[in-house]
Image (spheres, rainbow, N blue to C red):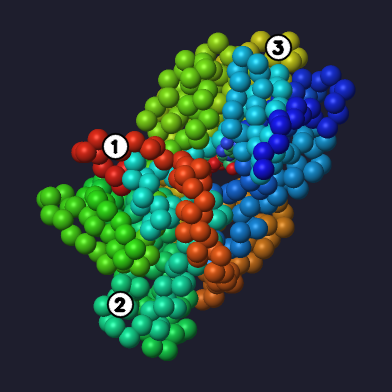
Amino acid sequence: MTTAATRAPAGRDTDSGRPRVVIIGSGFGGLFAARALAKAPVDITLIGKTAHHLFQPLLYQVATGILSEGEIAPATREVLRHQKNATTVLGEVVDIDLAGRTVTSTVLGRTTVHPYDELIVAAGAGQSYFGNDQFAEFAPGMKSIDDALELRGRIFGAFELAELATDQAEIDRLLTFVVVGAGPTGVEMAGQIAELSRRTLRRDFRRIDPTTARVILLDAAPAVLPSFGEKLGERARRQLAEGGVEVQLGAMVTSVDANGIDVKDGDGQARRIEAATKIWAAGVQASDLGRILGEQSGAAVDRAGRISVQPDLTLPGHPVVHVVGDMMALDKLPGVAQVAIQGGRYAAKAITRRLAGKAPQAPFRYKDKGSMATISRFHAVVDLGGRLKFEGFIAWVMWLALHLLYIVGFRSRLTAALHWTVSFLGRGRSQRVATQQQVYGRLALEHLGPGWEASKTGGPKEAPPADEDVTGRESA
Ligand SMILES: Cc1cc2nc3c(=O)[nH]c(=O)nc-3n(C[C@H](O)[C@H](O)[C@H](O)COP(=O)(O)OP(=O)(O)OC[C@H]3O[C@@H](n4cnc5c(N)ncnc54)[C@H](O)[C@@H]3O)c2cc1C
């Protein structure tokens, strides 16, 4: 059902007369921008496609049964409940009119038009299959809670089905897990599946031996974690191998189906891996809102859908429109949480300064706080930029402390710490539940038509050039 568009006041007080700040997206960029405006004399409307703020770096722990979805995805409304100048609205933004200064959002056929005086666009990025969106059905990505829960169902379900199977080839296929993309997400995911099979599930089955599960991490690139440098990447590769992960580099994915994956190695040899569970952790595609903004402002949009912004994160000719996080292209900044957080805060400060009649800030400068990835229990790699690189237990403690700090909400921090204790000191995982809806949900959505397909993958519809590496690189 579609209703006529209603015009919404961008704030709870329709007559406040205060400037209306509309923020699109409740991820890192959007939420931190909203919080940075807590004391500003403005009315904020934060429009989110989901009603929660998602801590994406821990999605793999939801997929592998360590954390619950609520721990990494608090309700945005609850997070902002004490911030009186902020209103939260559920809806997918489908249009932005730069000339008319309005944003149009829709949810279940209810369309709302939000006028703005200042706009912050932080709609992030979705999974990209580099023109091979058909892979999504068999190799789900990991961008949302839905993705993580479905993967949880597929991973634990594969062990259950293997226990029932009688044919050895079938058991082997069910106990083979392929993770595509050796960036931080792929490394963390592969490491956790290996740990799941070798520690958590070790004694849980009677017919199969879960420790014989094959966990394959493959990438077309020649290195693991290339953004961490050669030394840390090599350490990570060795640690993964010790934990039971087969790392296959220089391997390009050419096809994915229900029963396996076809790859082409660096020497041109084609081969097939029979595997029931495939996970896509390679490549991102920025929100389609970048294209809409590009068409109206003339700003360039790159192949990954990111829109070029000015040094102050605004669009050319539109000083009140700020684009931050994974959607923006500036100085080859990576698609990581800190870029989004710092960008969101910078945009908020630009708005408060303008409203106070102060001179604009200096151009946005990203402070690189480093990057980290866990490989297994008690083992991580941390690159603090320059010469400060850590690995092993100390890096893992740093990872633990930082993630606890950034999980939103005291309650979530407390229960996450509890679940980590259960998983890392003990053998258990407290979140192994998977419902039929989670396992079959994606397939059911396929039947709803192409609109769902587009919002699920966010990937380009046109095929890439024939020589393009379809495993790509992950920007996180
Ligand atoms: C699995 C995974 C692991 C990661 N690990 C790390 C890590 O370890 N370290 C790190 O620094 N970074 C990591 N990242 C990257 C990091 O999460 C992103 O760089 C960061 O979330 C970008 O913030 P953002 O605000 O631009 O977008 P997001 O955080 O993605 O937020 C976008 C928001 O916009 C909403 N939205 C999208 N489209 C619309 C629309 N049309 N209308 C309304 N709302 C919309 C979304 O629902 C979401 O709330 C990881 C990412 C993933 C997927």
Q: Residue at x 62, y 42 (%)?
A: 49
Decide which of 165, 191 is in the foreground and name it.
165
Separation of disc 2 and disc 3 at Cα?
A: 68 Å
Q: Secondary structure at mark 3?
A: loop
**Amino acid type for the residue under numbered disc 2:** Glu
Residues marked 2 and 3 touching at CB (< 8 Å): no
Residue 462 lies, in percent from the top left, at: 34, 36
Q: Quick one: which residue is furthest to the bottom in this view?
A: 206
Mark 2 or 1 closer to N-term?
2
Q: Nearer the viewer, residue 228 or 215?
A: 215
Front tag of 2 and 3? 2
Q: Tell me the crowding category of disc 3: few under 14, some 14 to 19, or many 20 or more residues within 10 angstroms, Cα based.
A: few
Q: Is mark 3 within 8 Å of ligand 1?
A: no
Q: Residue at x 61, y 59 (%)?
A: 69
User: Which element carries disc 2, helix, strand or loop?
Assistant: helix
The amino acid type of the residue labelled 3 equals Lys
Residue 32, label in figure: none
Query: Which image quarter: residue 475?
Result: top left
Residue receiving disc 3: 358
The residue that mark 2 highlights is 170
Q: Quadrant of the C terminus?
A: top left
- Expressed as whole percent of the image width and height from the top left, the position of residue 261 reads 28, 59
Element assignment for label 1: loop
Task: Report whether residue 9 is seen.
Answer: yes
Crowding at dot 2, Cα within 10 Å, few <14 / some 14-19 / many 20+, comes out as some
Residue type, mark 1 in image: Pro
Q: Position of residue 122 (x, y in %)?
A: 58, 33
Of the two numbered discs 1 and 3 on the same chain, state the one appearing first in sequence.
Answer: 3
For the N terminus, the quadrant is top right
Q: Which residue is mark 1?
A: 464
Q: How far, Cα to Cα, is label 1 from label 3?
A: 47 Å
Q: Earlier in the sequence, mark 2 or mark 3?
A: 2
